[in-house]
Image (cartoon, rainbow, N blue to C red):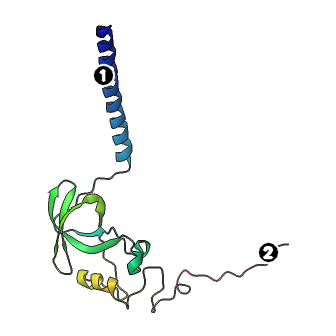
Amino acid sequence: YAKDLRDRISTAIRLARESLEVARLEQSLQYNKGRRQVIYRVGDLVLRRTHPLSDAAKGFAASLADRWDGPYRVSAQLTPVTYRLERCSDNEETDHVHVQDLKTFSQRISDNGKWEEDHDLASQARSPSSPSRAGQPSPSRDQCSGRGSRDYPLKPSPT
């Protein structure tokens, strides 16, 4: 009886290990299906994901906070998926940051047709005179007029 029990237990352990390996491979395939390989070089400009927490006592709502902070300049690649960053505005270095918390920073063209400088863009994003990020139009532009907009007459609905 003891030998038969030992054989059944060892068979069950072997089958469990094989099932775990198959499940691990299937889960890694599913996880990596949507992943893309991103490599940043030293000197690239990136934005860093913020992880705000709401605080009712201070009247702070995380849902209204900026999702990205920056721009930052990549100062070193520590591992294939972690980087050390340097903030462009004050050259403060960060600790290690995982690649999933980074995205490429693309500069915007200002109203006068020139590229905005890194430090100007970072300060403008926080200045009260800049347009709101909540879709409010800037004072110099009107969303409802200009090139590409049309007025559509309303027709009475049939009753």
Secondary structure of the residue carrying tag 1 is helix
Question: Residue sitting at 34 percent across and 21 percent down?
Answer: 12
Circle 1 residue = 14
Specify the segment rendered in magenta: 141-149
Question: Residue sitting at 83 percent across and 73 percent down?
Answer: 158
Secondary structure of the residue carrying tag 2 is loop
Q: Spatial distance from mark 1 to mark 2, Cα to Cα?
A: 71 Å
Where residue 133 sits: x, y (%)?
A: 42, 80
Q: Main secondary structure of the magenta part?
A: loop
Indicate which disc residue 157 carries. 2
Where residue 71 sits: x, y (%)?
A: 26, 74
On the image, which quarter does residue 124 sit in? bottom left
Q: Which mark lies nearer to you, 1 or 2?
A: 1
Residue kind at label 2, given as amino acid type: Ser
Please tell me whether residue 84 is drawn above or below residue 23 in the rendered image.
below
- Describe residue 11's horizontal placement relative to residue 87 as left or right: right
Residue kind at label 1, given as amino acid type: Arg
Disc 1 or 2, which lies upstream in sequence? 1
Task: Identify the image quadrant of the C terminus.
Answer: bottom right
